[in-house]
Amino acid sequence: MTDYPTIDHLVPHRAPMLLVDRILGEEGAVTRAEHAIPADSLFLVPGKGVPTYIAFEMMAQGICATDGLRRWRRGQGPELGFLLGCRKFAAARDWLQPGELLTIEAICLLDGETSSYDCRVLDAEGAVVATATVNVFQPEDIAGYLEGTKL
């Protein structure tokens, strides 16, 4: 078993917007992470739970954690990335519940500054909660990119 750094060394997100708790493992092009829905989730709708569409942000942060692992191995810190788009987001149910333990899978399909990932969020029993193909832009030199960009 590999020891991974804590999630704050891999992603720039912080609570209450941090939706990945830790890396579970890597196998080939697949990175697995975990998130437990907190009782005080920023996205909690009283009496219903957390809308499952929030799983899309969990997927994006799972991708960010994958990139963070690569950067960590090169002695670099986490960096911002840009969400380019999503294809085929599907949710198997409407709500996630506080205390629910989820596994986030990010499967790299195309690697580079512009990358594509098949993502899944699974419940504790391994049932699929949500899926999507997510495209991202992760420049190696984010500061240089932002300096050259007129927003």
Image (cartoon, grey):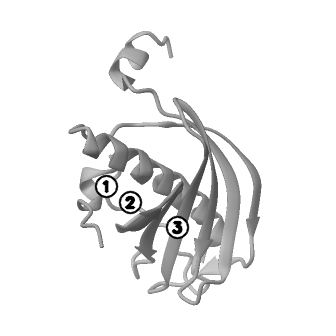
Residue 135 image position (x, y, % from top left): 64, 41
The answer for how far apart the CA atoms under marks 3 and 1 are is: 18 Å
Of the numbered discs 3 and 1, the one sitting upstream in the chain is 1
Residue 5 vertical placement versus 135 (above, below)? below
Of badges 3 and 1, the one in the foreground is 3
| Residue that carries the numbered disc 3 in the rendered image | 104
Look at the numbered disc 1 and give the secondary structure of its residue: loop
Between the C-alphas of marks 2 and 3, the distance is: 13 Å
Q: Amino acid at mark 3?
A: Ile
Q: Nearer the viewer, residue 20 or 114?
A: 114
For the residues marked 2 and 1, what is the alpha-carbon distance in whole angstroms? 5 Å
> What amino acid is found at the position of numbered circle 2 in the picture?
Leu
Choose between 137 and 149: the one closer to the eye.
137
Q: Is residue 10 left or right of residue 112?
A: left
Q: On residue 79, which mark appears?
A: none
From this viewpoint, which residue is outermost toward the left?
A: 75
Q: Which numbered disc, 2 or 3, marks the residue closer to the eye?
A: 3
At label 1, the amino acid type is: Arg
Element class at badge 3: strand
- Judge left or right: residue 115 versus residue 20: right
Split into 4 quadrants, where in the image is the N terminus? bottom left
Q: Position of residue 17 (x, y in %)?
A: 40, 57
Residue 64 image point, x, y percent: 44, 48
Q: Which residue in the protein does label 2 denote?
A: 18
Q: Could you classify mark 2 by the number of other residues whose Cα lies within 10 Å: few (under 14), some (14-19), or many (20 or more)?
A: some
Which of the two discs, 2 and 3, labels the residue nearer the N terminus?
A: 2
The residue at the point 20 percent across, 39 percent down is 75
Is 16 situated left or right of 104 in this image?
left
| CB contact under 8 Å: marks 2 and 1 | yes
Which residue is disc 1 drawn over? Answer: 14
**Horizontal and vertical percent for residue 27?**
48, 63
